[in-house]
Image: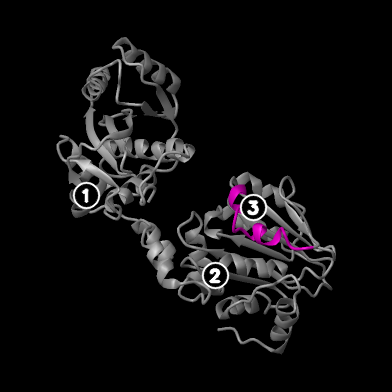
Amino acid sequence: MISFNEWDWLNFELTILDNPYIDFELYDKQVLVALTSCHNHEGINEFLTGGPGGGGKTKLLAALALQFVEFPHYRCLVTRKNYRELVGTGSVFDILKNIPGVKSRESGLIRIIFPSGAEIHFKAFNDESHKQDVKGESYHTILNDEASELPESVLRFLYRSLRKKADDWIPLRFGNASNPGGESTDYLIEKYIDGDLPYICMGYKDNPYIDDDTYEAALMELDYIDQQYQMKGDWHYRPSVGDLLSLAEGQAQLTTLDTPVHYELISIDLAGKGKDMFAVVCYDYLVNGLEYIKDFDQTQSSNPESLLVNFVIKHNPNPAAPRTSLIVIEQEGGGSPEYARKYFQELILDYGYNIPVILKKPSGSKYQRARPLMHSIKYGNTKLNQESIYINDFIDESIQLSPDGKGRSPNLVDSASLARNYLHTDILGNVSHVSVGARIGG
């Protein structure tokens, strides 16, 4: 535990409490971080704060960024994974950009310039190569918002820009605020959680400005994995087999529905090599806001055309008025995905079905892509047709889905995840008039 001296408290009073640009109060945990960030006058002050959500990390970073802006030579850098989060609603930039008397720039060189001449810069590092953007730059303070999401190589590289003149009294600070779960989680654990550098846990239960009961109820809507990171702030948790869905949770959603359909998708997970299967799913978005996995089929055949045609015919008995709105194919790496799209498009046209066939390139691992669907099933927003012959295989795949990609190939799960994710990101996300259920998108 750091023992703060008279200088620490005097500096805090002059640069935080008396700072004309900081128009909000810090609570005790935030004060502790602020004091920790300036305690070492000679070397580099490093810290990690956060853990659970709702602790007020962004407000704290805004205060730390503002701390020395009354001094002309002060330079600060605030980082984030991508541009949208860097300047979006509720970001550090969003909090600071409208301060009276300052000049802010939201594109190109994103920065805020104060009347004194002090500057706060903002940079996004969604790609490792962007770390070169800080070459030749010098900062007193570097603040990494959601640091675990930044690549480890970027976090390490940023230290080269933390420097000042020998007679400069403003302390050097390298601060990280984050929930666990990003790609640099292990790096932060080694340095701060299990290491010797300061870690100050700060979450919604510490924050006196938040209704923690209401916020905790909101966090309960997250899937199991995000609950470990966002609600519990568990840095050592690692996803494992069985975390996404249990047998009881899957079986609880088995039913048969005849609710009118608002939108129907057929999605295809193309077969890879070896024992991989060609899998198709019929996925419905119902008029009552629920979603329904109506049917599956799969084959290991190298010629799956007849399976797809029969599946389309089964769910669209009248070619002139098909119930299916769209057929989505997962775009595989390599080869010619556009050729596959055209091939299947022409195939169903030959049978009289004018249903558009499109490609969708997935992002993330099969495990990550399945998380929204598994959560939707767990909380009853997606129902499972108990009469589909492969529905129990789908539940088994869901239970056995492995975060490391080992074990049983989840072809049925991947086809359903493709349909569900396309529905939410490309259809519901772009159509404002669609009425959705209260739990849609969970």
Q: CA distance from mark 1 to mark 3?
A: 40 Å
Amino acid type of disc 1? Gly
Q: Earlier in the sequence, mark 2 or mark 1?
A: 2
130, 343: nearer the viewer? 343
Q: Earlier in the sequence, mark 1 or mark 3?
A: 3
- Magenta segment boundaries in residue numbering: 82-100
Is residue 228 shown to the viewer in this render?
Answer: no
The crowd level at tag 1 (other Cα within 10 Å; few <14, some 14-19, many 20+) is many
Amino acid type of disc 3? Val
The residue singled out by tag 1 in the image is: 250
Amino acid type of disc 2? Thr
Secondary structure under badge 3?
A: helix
> Residue 49, labelled with which disc?
2
> To which quarter of the image does residue 91 belong?
bottom right
Residue lying furthest top = 350
The crowd level at tag 2 (other Cα within 10 Å; few <14, some 14-19, many 20+) is many
Q: In the figure, is residue 52 to the left or right of 374?
A: right
The residue singled out by tag 3 in the image is: 87
360, 148: nearer the viewer? 360
- Residue 212 is covered by the magenta coloring: no
Q: CA distance from mark 2 to mark 3?
A: 21 Å
> Looking at the picture, does residue 400 appear above or below residue 102?
above
Q: Earlier in the sequence, mark 2 or mark 3?
A: 2
